[in-house]
Amino acid sequence: MTDHSPAAAAQHPITPPPELVQQWRTEGHHQDYCSASEHAIAQAARWGADQELEACCSEMDKWGDIHYSAGWKFSKDLRTARRPKPPSLKEQALDELDRIPTHDNEGRTVGVDVSIIRRALEALDD
């Protein structure tokens, strides 16, 4: 039988600190889309997944150090794959720009020249 008591939970290596749980509960009271407990549960799941990812990446880093291998590169690639950054505003704008029709079905220009907007967006730093 599994022990679900608070004391048993505190012994598990991936257990959020009580202060963080309280913060999530407080934040949850201000959410319109879910209850405080739903918010806290979602935050705890994310936090636990992040802890596990970092533990795995840390082990890969150690493995790379010991074997003079690219463990650090594997951990970086894993972080990038599992926690991708959302596209920047610049990337979103360029994607939307690509959706603007500039030619009709016959391949003729329809009078929309987005090249200046594209160059301006591409010149921006991310």
Image: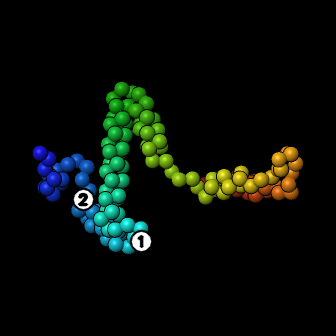
| Left or right of 21 on screen, residue 120 | right
Mark 1: secondary structure: loop
Query: 114 or 76: nearer the eye?
Result: 114
Of the numbered discs 1 and 2, the one sitting upstream in the chain is 2
- Per the model, the C-alpha gap separating discs 1 and 2 is 25 Å
Query: 70 or 22: nearer the eye?
Result: 22
Viewer-side label of 1, 2: 1
What residue is pinned by disc 1? 32
Residue 72 in the image: above or below residue 46: above
Most extreme residue toward the front, as rendered? 105
Q: Residue at horizontal 35%, vertical 58%?
A: 42
Most extreme residue toward the bottom, as rendered? 30
Q: Amino acid at mark 2?
A: Pro
Q: Residue at horizontal 45%, vertical 47%?
A: 83
| Left or right of 43 on screen, residue 121 | right
Residue 66 percent coordinates (x, y): 33, 29
Residue 81 percent coordinates (x, y): 47, 42
Looking at the rendering, in which quadrant would you find the C terminus? Answer: bottom right
Badge 1 density bin: few <14, some 14–19, many ≥20, Cα 10 Å: few
Residue 125 percent coordinates (x, y): 64, 55
Q: Amino acid at mark 1?
A: Asp
Looking at the rendering, in which quadrant would you find the N terminus? Answer: top left
What residue is pinned by disc 2? 17
